[in-house]
Amino acid sequence: MTGLRHQRPLVVLIFLVAVAALAGAVWRYGYLQALEQLARRAEGDLALASDRLSTELQVYQELAVLLTDHPMLDGLDDPARRDEAQAHLLAVADKTAALDVAYADLTGRILVSANGLTAGDVSDAAYFRRALQGALGSDHGLRAPLDRRAYYYAAPSFDAAGQVRGAVVVVADVASIELAWPGNAPAVFFTDANGEVFITNRFELLFWTRPASGVGLVPPDGPAPEFRAAQTGGHEIWNIRWGPYVPTRALHLQRHLPIVGLTGEILVNAAPARRLAGLQASAVAAICLAFGAMLFLATERRRTLAQANAVLESRVAKRTRALSEANAQLRQEISERKEAEAALKRAQADLVQAGKLGALGQMSAGISHELNQPLMAIRSFAENGTQYLARGRSDKVGDNLTRIADLAHRMGRIIRNLRAFARQESEEVRQVDIVAILDSAIELTGARMRQDAVTVAFARPDRPIWVRGGDVRLGQVFVNLLTNAADAMQGRDDKRIEIALNGDGPLRVIIRDNGPGIDVPDKVFEPFYSTKEVGASEGMGLGLSISYGIVQSFGGDIRGENGPQGGAVFTVQLEPWQAEQAA
Ligand SMILES: Nc1ncnc2c1ncn2[C@@H]1O[C@H](COP(=O)(O)OP(=O)(O)OP(=O)(O)O)[C@@H](O)[C@H]1O
Ligand SMILES: [Mg+2]
């Protein structure tokens, strides 16, 4: 693109040169065509002028021939006959506009002459000598005593014996012939054997001789005209400065006229041919330039468009790059976010476990008491049994053994619950029985409740109620709720916790106590919010926030508020397990 822009002046220059060359070629072709037409017309004009001259001169030639037999030429020794003959010849000369008509005898002496303009003796004249030989003599020139351009004819006159006795001489006036020619015809001139212009319709050309080259011969009056001849496409073009009546640049044609012994030549103005060719060349050049200008404009326009396009494309590419960068960054952020989420989940799981272990720690004293008590009972039942066995009271022994079995069974249940509570749950969400979960939570906290004389009233339905969740984590939630309630009621006389289940759609577990109620209900789910003193039953302030996270992860909800008759009311809402979810 840039290269092209730099080359533009060169391209324009080449185009202009090409247009100039084409215009030149068209000019030359048009010029030659026009010259061809001009030459054809000029040939016609020259032929016409030559024929006219020949015909006019032929009149005088025939006149000379006709007069040779005339009877007036007989007996011219007689002066009276001579006068008669002179009158006759004068009449003939007047009628034919001849300069002179005369008769010469064998010696060349003029015996009789119409106007007396012929020299007294023509014996030296070539035309006369030719006539003496019995042929028709002719000549032209400026001769004394005439001193006018004249054309001479001499016809032999024969005597009765057939011998030449003399010659009739007819002198024709060239100027009068020229005068009869039309004035507006192209410049025509007739040159003799020497190349000198003898007859012409342009006075300026008279007696001019065409030079070999360069400056012409000096005409009798006036400076030498500049003359150059050149060939153009088979035509001869003359460059000649000869005043307003002779074209400066002219097409030159010539034609030999043997009858009159002259060469007819014509000069036709070549300027119209040049003008026509110029017009054609300018038209072609104008069309080419207009076309070129249009092409140039179109190219410029296309170039501008292409430039705009390139700018646009580069912008789009830049934007796309920026977008892909942003996209990559976003992906990076997403993956970081995912990593953080996974880390958070791990942390949460760790926290759940930690909270669970914390609760276990708190419960450990009660649990060991809970296990110790049946162990002590088993021991005393066993000792009693031994004594009954010694006494032979087998019925009492059986009784004791049954009790021992019950106690062992109870201990096993406590241990199983503990193990289940401490377990780390791997499965996210599954079908669990909320009634069984509440049973085990009550059992786990049983020792503590008994120790603090807390009554736990559970309106237990007889059938399982299936919800979405995990039994270990939900157990952790309820253990914390029950423990919190027991903590809150410490130091009170009547300690009571009520557990109820209700709800048709989502299931709600409501745990209510008759403690002092929650200090700041909005803050209880915040991590590390605790009103419990640091000490034996110290709180981390994590139990409820962990419970919140657990319930939320099952798609449920947990709320804490104060009841209308005092005491705290915690509601855990859970999604019921739908049959199709199991599929
Ligand atoms: N039943 C309730 N009655 C009154 N206040 C309660 C009750 N349950 C919880 N609270 C208040 O909410 C706070 C937060 O309880 P949470 O279970 O989160 O922490 P904690 O019991 O103090 O410590 P942790 O459970 O970590 O051992 C408690 O310190 C208490 O002030
Ligand atoms: Mg707690």
Image (cartoon, rainbow, N blue to C red):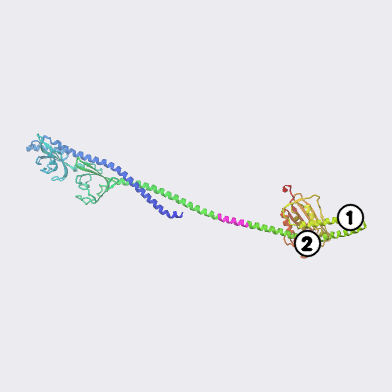
Where residue 321 sits: x, y (%)?
56, 55
In this figure, which residue is indicated by the disc labeled 2? Answer: 362
- Residue 434, image x and y in percent? 77, 52
Locate residue 561: give its quadrant: bottom right
Which residues lie in the magenta part? 320-333
Residue 452 visible, this orientation: no
Name the residue type under label 2. Answer: Gln
In the visual, does 333 lie left or right of 499? left
Classify mark 1: residues with Cα within 10 Å, few (<14), some (14-19) or many (20+): few
- The numbered mark, 1 or 2, whose residue comes first in the sequence reads 2
Of the numbered discs in the image, which one, if any, rests on residue 399?
Answer: 1
In this image, 4 relative to 107: left or right? right
Residue 426 in magenta? no
Q: Which residue is located at x 11 percent, y 44 percent? A: 124
User: What secondary structure prevails in the magenta region?
Assistant: helix
Q: Nearer the viewer, residue 575 or 147?
A: 575
